[in-house]
Image (spheres, helix red, strand yellow):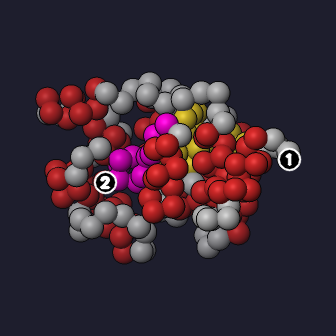
Amino acid sequence: MTNEDTVRFAVAPDRIQIVYADTDTLSSFLNRNSFNYFLKVFEAMNAEVTISKIVLDELYNGKKKELRKYTIERLKQTKRITIEDIEPFSEEDDTYAQLSETMGKGEASALALAKHSKRKAGLASNNMSDVANYAKANQIELWPTGKILRYAVDLEIMNMKQADELWKKMKADGLKLPRYDTFKEYYDKDSI
């Protein structure tokens, strides 16, 4: 790690206490059997990884659902992730109903839970057009896949070659990622 990387990372630890993950970002790691990288980034910050029941349902109904279900059920048993449901007639439920009129149910549920969290919350999502303005207005820190991979490299959870290979696979699968062909380009040119 260079001095620049150390400075870049120095502002991140303990910024968030809990991260709510959206279906697209979870899928980007789960479908490539690389979810451990995702978890280790947030564990390094002592941030709890939480999935809404609605996102969980989306994951269990998509392609590669058996792999996803197996992985998530194992992680729930080891308490590396938690599942949170939106209580009916709660503030979260009201926010979810409002947000789900303009965006997907997974994003809406993750945002609603993050907004009403009693802890400093983050949102792992690649759907910037849907969530960015709302997250910013509600002090919810965004964690798209590129940012997660950047921290995985900075923390030496994975090396640049591994991150680049994963980036290329995600791009080939049509995941919404920044315009760069390689992760190295993103890492060198894009800011956090």
Give residue 174's quadrant in the image.
bottom left
User: How crowded is the residue under tag 2: few (<14 C-alpha within 10 Å), some, or many (20+)?
Assistant: many
Residue 69 in view, yes or no? no
Pinpoint residue 155: horizontal percent, then vertical percent.
32, 34
Residue highlighted by disc 2: 163
Q: Quick one: label 2 or label 1, which is nearer the N terminus?
A: 1
The residue at 31%/54% (across/down) is: 163
Query: Is 14 a magenta residue?
Result: no
In percent of width and height, residue 162 lies at: 30, 54
Instruction: Please say whether residue 142 is one of the residues in the magenta stretch.
Output: yes
Give the quadrant of residue 129: bottom left
Which residue type does callout 2 highlight?
Ala
Would residue 81 be found to the left or right of residue 27 on screen? right
Residue 20 picture location, percent across and down: 58, 44
Looking at the image, residue 176 lies above or below residue 109: below
Residue at 70% x, 69% y: name it: 61
Magenta residues, start to end: 139-149
The residue beneath circle 1 is 88
Which residue lies most toward the left here?
3
SS for dot 1: loop
Asked if residue 109 can be seen in this view, the reply is yes
**Quadrant including the C terminus:** top left
Amino acid marked by disc 1 = Pro
Q: Which mark is residue 189?
A: none
- Give the x, y percent position of residue 150: 31, 45
Task: Indicate left or right for 19 with 182 as reference.
Answer: right
Q: Quadrant of the N terminus?
A: top left
> Which residue: 24% across, 33% down?
8
Q: Residues within 10 Å of mark 1 (few under 14, many from 20)?
A: few
User: Viewer-nearest of labels 2 and 1?
Assistant: 1
